[in-house]
Amino acid sequence: MRYEQPALVRNSAAESPVLTVLITIRVAAHYDMIERLRFRSLDTRMPDSVTFLVIDEGSSFEDAERLKAACAEIGFDYVRHNTEKDLFCLAGARNIGASLSRSQFIMFEDVDLFPYPGFYQDIIDEIHVQGLDTHSNRFLTVPCLYLSEQATEAALAGTLSKNEILHDHLTGGPLVDFALPASSALVINRMFYLSIGGSNDQFKGWGLEDLELAYRLTRGTNKFMSPKDHRWLIEGGYAHNPTYRGWRAQFRLHGELLARKSIYIFHAHHPRDTAWRNPELHRANKAIFQSSNESFDAKGHTLPSLPDAKRGRSLIFGRGTFAYNPALLPLWGDLEVKGYQDFQERDIIEHVRANGINRVIFTNPYANDMRLSVYNRVRSAGIPFYVVERGALTDSMFIDDTGFCCESTRYRREHWPAELDAGRLRRVQDYISAETSSGSALEKQGERIGARAALQKLGIPPQKKVLFVPFQSRSDTTVNHFAGPIGSFDNFVDLVRDVTKRLPPDWVVVFKKHPLSSVQETVPGAIDVGNMHIKDLMELTDYVLLMNSGVGVLSILFDRPCIYTAQAFYADDALNRGASKAGDVLRLLKEGFTVDQDSRLRFLSYLLEDFYSFGKFTVTEKSYTDNATLSITERIDYYRVNLLGARVLDTDDRERILNPNAPIYDLFREWIRSNKHTERQASPSGAPQSADEASRKGRSAFHAKRYQEAALMFDAACSIQPNRATHYRAAAEALFAMGNRNIALSRLEKARLLAPDNKSIKRRIREMKRPPFLQFLSKPFPIAKD
């Protein structure tokens, strides 16, 4: 994945800026744009944490030289994009600037904008006040006042203050030609911007790229009440419209948060270049805008991720969703994708060094001998690498630069926080409470029934002590490559049988087959719990005995003493004990030991906040060996990314402002009340609480020929129950009936992945690809009537 980056000329002295202001420009002849860069000096209280980057998108060579010299003089970083395009591409220029920036946050500015004294410090403050530093998907939009020619001259001369402008504007004076309550002067987390593909560079000339990005940000965060007809685009009279209709009403509230605090940016008057506004291009851009919004509503962000230029180059093997994922791709920089087979004859060490590759990205490197051979060569040569794989907690993944699982050093207590402050302590305690009471698990389980009911079902008297043995799959990587002292899976089974036979009568052993294993182990004298939920078993047990299963982390979560017999990544004497002989296991059970609480909380907090990343999985299963089924992760939607202790992304944001009595809704409150508008009303059928409810509403809407509503409901069913192909088939039919063939086909492709042997799905994909005049031959999937 090559994304060519032009060379950056660095003039700024700031080493670790918080905010980079991106100013895109193509010098035009009808007024002096270059001189307007100096407008930023009107903020006489400029923070050291703010830098400026000017992206020159296609200026003539002579103008580019003048622009470059001006940037050097005023300390602005500069980059020139040598484009031969006739039309200015604002989106592409902003994407280049975002990729080259060094700060956590970026801000977009037009060259004609100028601040008041203290403006940029106000923006830095708002980043913290509005939580952009903890929630990556949040953003700011700065309201903009377009000044008259006279007001511009006076403001730039210092004879007209910010407060005078605002007072005149609020009282209907002549200083402001027009206002944008929410503008394209956006502030956003840079890594989030890169991960969602930045701005859509399909727009050309006088475009709608600003609004398209604003639509995705506004609807993605959905911070405020959803408006009526959210896709509707108001163009004329936007600043004065009191109806809470269309997405720009919702977008405006983000601007109101700053306007109420008197935070504005000003636009300097300039002569208009009428040739720039091409109505034909605008119509084409509007079609792109509408199509992009429909696609976002159906599928979320779909633009290719942008690289973080300072990350250099990476080599990655394949496009598996763990590592080749929109949330992670910016971290890999410029990316080269290869297969392991490419290095059976070619030397990977030579290839890495010859191509300036900074790191190699692996998923499970022990999956087969070919992978392992390449992995070992990279490690032995001291080439930096990351292993990206599934973690031991619900929704978790790890990104490790020291090795895979048990060979990693990243779990050692030297990396844990020395102590937990009040915030971390509260968060880890809240997590333990929520996770131990939930029914979530890494693999399919039976329904939770609680420890008391589970003991009764298993026939275990309350006075008995319980030893729980979670068996792993015989084909498990950690079983076959990290057996450690126990030596093999069979040796572990023999140890469990021996321990069961020798335990005193006040003990009972219960064991569980791994959900993906097709081999039923036998342990005479012990109780096979079947598909009983792993968390019910963790609640009822007194001790856990295992090889090196991830259940060892669950043991820490549930505060249960655990004995591991193989090489375990979570091994720590304050958390668990190791033993590989039956006599040693029996001694530990007789003497007893407990989990140190301080170590437990610090270890879990480390996993949650520093080491593990988290995302929602879409998983299928297929036969792998005679002994096991393989779990296939089709998609991961990361909502938190941690890279070796640094929080890169966090989009798990559930805080919303829905009370129409809040002052922020003042402009729209009368309309909201008189129209009895509610959050539920904004969606035609309300928010479904289950996949069955969503599917039922979708079928009803489909047969009423309300295909857009039906598609939304079927997509909601897909989100709630992502492993059922029927939901995707139904969504495809609704989308196809709307005329969205490409999006419909994407739903069918998902259904095909879930049901690869279903011939009807393959047939329907072929049918949808037919030209319109042949569609009468097609046989759509039937949508049942209730």
Image: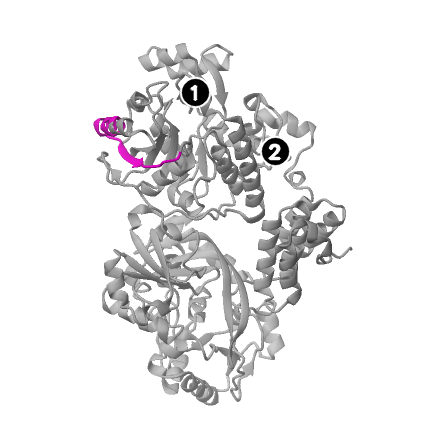
Is residue 73 within the magenta segment?
A: yes
Residue segment shown in magenta = 66-85
Is residue 210 within the magenta segment?
A: no
User: Which residue does the image show at 35% across and 20% down from the upper left?
Assistant: 29
Residue to which mark 1 is pinned: 273
Residue to which mark 2 is pinned: 232
Q: Amino acid at mark 2?
A: Trp
Q: Which mark is residue 779?
A: none
Horizontally, is 16 left or right of 202 in the view?
left
Q: Amino acid at mark 1?
A: Asp
Image coords of residue 72 (percent x, y): 22, 30
Q: Nearer the viewer, residue 512 or 251?
A: 251
Image coords of residue 500 (percent x, y): 47, 86
Q: Quadrant of the C terminus?
A: bottom right
Q: Is residue 391 above or below residue 710?
A: below
Asked whether residue 653 is in view, the answer is: yes
Mark 1: which secondary structure? loop
Horizontally, is 308 left or right of 148 in the view?
left
Dot 1: within a 10 Å radius of its alpha carbon, few (fewer than 14), some, or many (20 or more) residues? few
Q: Nearer the viewer, mark 1 or mark 2?
A: 1
Q: Is residue 98 above or below residue 551?
A: above
Residue 580 position by quadrant: bottom left
Horizontally, is 157 left or right of 523 in the view?
left
Image coords of residue 750 (percent x, y): 57, 59
User: Which residue does the image show at 41% across and 74% down from the upper left?
Assistant: 477
Q: Nearer the viewer, residue 621 or 497?
A: 621
Image coords of residue 187 (percent x, y): 41, 35
Asked whether residue 252 is in view, the answer is: no
Dot 2: within a 10 Å radius of its alpha carbon, few (fewer than 14), some, or many (20 or more) residues? some
Residue 458 position by quadrant: bottom right
Q: How many marks?
A: 2
